[in-house]
Image: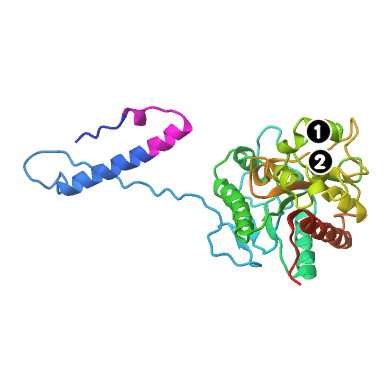
Amino acid sequence: MRILLPSSVAAGGSAPQRRHTARALLAAALLAAALLAAQGCSGDSGGSGGATITVPPPPPTPVPTGPVGPLAAGQAYTDGPGYVEYTPGDAPVLIIAPHGGALSPSGLADRTCSGCVTVNDANTQELARTIVEAFRARTGARPHLLVNRLHRRKFDANRDRTEATGGGAALNATWVWFHEAADSARAAIVRRGQRGLVIDLHGHGHAVPRLELGYLLGDADLRASDATLAGNGAMARSSIARLAGDSRSTPDRGLGVLRGPRSLGALLANGGYPAVPSPADPAPLVGQEYFDGGYNTQRHGSVFGGPLDAIQIECNFAGVRDSESSRAAFANAVVNALLVYLDTHYGWRPAA
Ligand SMILES: [Zn+2]
């Protein structure tokens, strides 16, 4: 028996073509098995001298997914090996800690991609958990929390799949689970009829002790005047593009949500934690180091029209995340800022 395959199956082709090829091969194998079954298989027909044809069953091809619902607020879910963790919430905020994991299983290869960063952001997983708990204690509502429990030398949860995993296949399913968990949190917020905010929480070691808020706008962009940025459409290229157009606070639309008096940088600075950009510190000076955002702010914010906005918060160390008491104090300041921000720009208040 010969099985003729479409010509596209034999060729290499692009990624969509290869997916098509895989489906075509599977269909061909199933077709062959059906034909053989209909013929009562070939070897037992007696006397014809035909060779036995064995068609192996198609191998199982599990499709990686995120957490499977229904999901309960306040309960922690993990991917299969327990490398990443998602705790759903009921407030319109998702806090992600991609660089604060401690797990380093010997069976997992270290990432070896050239130029990839493998140093953790110390204490940021603990800080994220502290912020969530402080928010819940204050309001009764819980932000969604997404944590990478693996050390960054194993897995970087703020990169595309190849760089995140170091190119190996072992963590592909973990990477998919992580970002689908973020999608699940965003969808849960939308189902409640809300807009809201993703905070991607990091730590920096730069010389200036201040919070660096990343909106996907580079330091040179930020050094331009508000009028210039308004004229060149900068906010449409930012991770809060949607908020710049629909803030409940009409005067804050546009550049206001970036560095006006009710921007997140302003609210955090008012709480005692200097931040850039903010009214007092609208842009890094030439030569000053600054992180402007990354994969998560791009993927899970609104630059491509997503339903939630995203801000990367890069925390300095001393007095912010270096001790349990500093983390608790900073978490309180973040909650204070978030409550004003969510009310002002999204119209969300905790239930009385
Ligand atoms: Zn980081």
The mark tally for this picture is: 2
Residue 229 numbered mark, or none? 1
Task: From the top left corner, tell me how far across and down residue 337 is, in percent.
Answer: 84, 57
Check if mark 1's residue and mark 2's residue have beta carbons within 8 Å: yes
In the picture as drawn, the residue positioned furthest to the front comes out as 250
Residue at the disc numbered 2:
255
Left or right of 3: which side holds 185?
right
Residue span colored magenta: 7-22
Secondary structure of the residue carrying tag 2 is loop
Counting residues from the start of the chain, the first of labels 1 and 2 encountered is: 1
Left or right of 320: which side holds 154?
left
Residue 199 numbered mark, or none? none
Task: From the top left corner, tell me how far across and down residue 165 is, in percent.
Answer: 61, 42
Name the amino acid type tagged 2. Leu
Left or right of 70: which side holds 262?
right
Quadrant including the N terminus: top left
- Can the viewer see residue 203 in this picture? no
In the image, what residue occupies the spot 62% across and 61% down? Answer: 192
In the picture as drawn, the residue positioned furthest to the left comes out as 47
In the image, what residue occupies the spot 93% across and 44% down? Answer: 280
Q: Is residue 130 magenta?
A: no
- Judge the density around disc 2: few (<14), some (14-19), many (≥20) Cα neighbours within 10 Å: some
Secondary structure of the residue carrying tag 1 is helix
In the picture as drawn, the residue positioned furthest to the bottom comes out as 352
- Judge the density around disc 1: few (<14), some (14-19), many (≥20) Cα neighbours within 10 Å: some
Main secondary structure along the magenta-highlighted residues = helix
